[in-house]
Structure formats: C-alpha cells, structure tokens
Amino acid sequence: MALGLRCFRLVHPVFCNYLAALTRPISEGTLKTVSGRQNDHEQSMAFPALPVRHFATKKAKAKGKGQFQTRVNLNAALVEDIINLEEVDEEMKSVMEALKDNFNKTISIRTSPGSLDRITVVTANGKLALNQIGQISMKSPHLILVNMASFPECTAAAIKAIRESGMNLNPEVEGTLIRVPIPKVTREHREMMVKLAKQNTNKAKDSLRKVRTNAMNKLKKSKDKVSEDTIRLIEKQISQMADDTVAELDRHLAVKTKELLG
C-alpha cells in the first residue's frame, strides 16, 4: 500500500500536466486554424503558423555602423595603372601639413611677427602674403610694425587684411607704417583663437574632400576596364585614407584647443 502511494505521488504531476496539455486551447500565435467543408461535413484543422522573417530596421543598421570594419591595404604598385594611390596619399598629407603649419604660425596665444606672415592681402595684382609686400618686425613685446614703404598703394588693403584675419588685431596707420598692438591674453582672446582653429580645421576638411572627390572621379573613368570588385576595393582604400586624415586633423585640433585654453 505504501509503495503504491509513493508511485502515485511520482506519477501524479506528470499525469496532470499531460491532461492539461490535451485540454489547453490551441494558441493563435503558434497555430493557424483552417475551416472548410468536405462531403457536407465541416472540418476544422490546425496547422503550425509559418515562420516570419524579420528584416533589420534603419535604427539597427545605424547602430551597427560604429562597429569595427575590416581595413583595406592595397599595394599601390598593383593598381598604379588605374590610379596613383601614392599621389592621392601625398595630396592628403599636404592638407594635414598645411593645417599644422597654420597652427604653428598663426594660431598662437602670443602674437608674433611670424603670425602675420601668411595673412593674405587682396591687391590689384592678385592675392599676396603680407610678408611679400611689407616688412614685418617686432618693435616691442606689445607692438608689431609693418613697413609698407615698398608697396604704399597696398597699405589700405594690408590694414583691412590684418583687421579681418580673425586674430583680434586692431592695426593703426602712420603714413606707410602700420602699427599692430598685440592684444592681452584674456579668456575671450583664447576662445577666439580656438574658434579660429576650428574654422581652419573645417577648411582643411573641405580641401580633403576635394582631394577625395577628384580621386573618385579619376577612378570612375576606369570602370569599363576593370572589375567592379577591384573598383570597390580601391574606393574603400581612398575613403579609408581620407577617414584616417580626418582623424589626424581632429587630433591636432584637440591638442591645439587644449594648448590655447590652458
């Protein structure tokens, strides 16, 4: 008797679950009911629902963009008949070097004679650097002089260019001598230098986009001569080079911003 009760306790839960499964209504989410008439008898059958394919949404795709992507490393010599990747790389590097040179000579807390060298002056003979038409010297730690005796007709244009250089300079003129007081290093001056650094970085990025666009246009001319896969790889290589240069531009801007704000 005791053995029978023990066996019943063990079997009872399984048996109850089995009965519940038999009496449970068919779920609409997993089964699909089809009704019809055959030989004047109404039949009702349940079939498993077909699997539904879920496609990635735009949001999901955008989320995956930040994930690591395989880098391309083409041998420039193997594709030189299609495009000169070394030349494209040099053009991109020149954009980077131009910005670094601009930061070193123009974007500085302390204004120096070298800061004025690259200021572009619009003259009757075209655009010229200030140091090409004027003699720039340091009169004192607080004053820079620009002697325009060699090109007196460009004095007014030089004053305008200095004032609009974005370096917070307010030049004064005495005949053909331009006096440029060096502004005090204030928080406002530092923030203005940071703003100018960002503007110059954006200009560098514009130049970089032109280099990339020109390279892509050259590549399009070869689409009839080489396979699509080859073109796609070269396009990815050029985009990768441009992205690396943009990252380098941003890195130099971050370093310069930290230097300017102290």
Image (cartoon, rainbow, N blue to C red):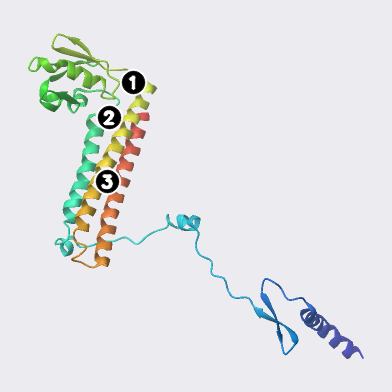
**Residue at left 82%, top 81%?**
16
Q: Hey, which residue is sitting farthest left in the picture?
A: 150
- To which residue does mark 3 refer? 209
Please name the amino acid that badge 2 sits on: Ile
Which percent across, then down, holds residue 202? Answer: 31, 38
Residue lying at 14% horizontally and 8% vertically, measured from the top left: 175
| 173 in relation to 196, above or below | above
Q: How far, Cα to Cα, is label 1 from label 2?
A: 13 Å
Dot label at residue 107:
2
Assign the N terminus to one quadrant of the image. bottom right
Q: Is residue 68 visible?
A: yes
Q: Quadrant of residue 76?
A: bottom left
Q: Is residue 262 visible?
A: no
**Label placed on residue 185:** 1
Amino acid at dot 1: Val
The type of residue carrying mark 3 is Arg
Vertical side of 107 occupied by 23: above or below: below
Mark earlier in primary sequence (1, 2) = 2
- Precedes in sequence: disc 1 or disc 3: 1
Q: Are marks 1 and 2 in contact (CB under 8 Å)?
A: no
Q: Quadrant of the C terminus?
A: top left
Q: Residue at x 20, y 17 (%)?
A: 159
In the image: residue 78, left or right of residue 163: left
Looking at the image, which is closer to me, 257 or 21? 21
Contact between labelled residues 3 and 1, with CB atoms less than 8 Å apart:
no
At mark 2, the secondary structure is loop
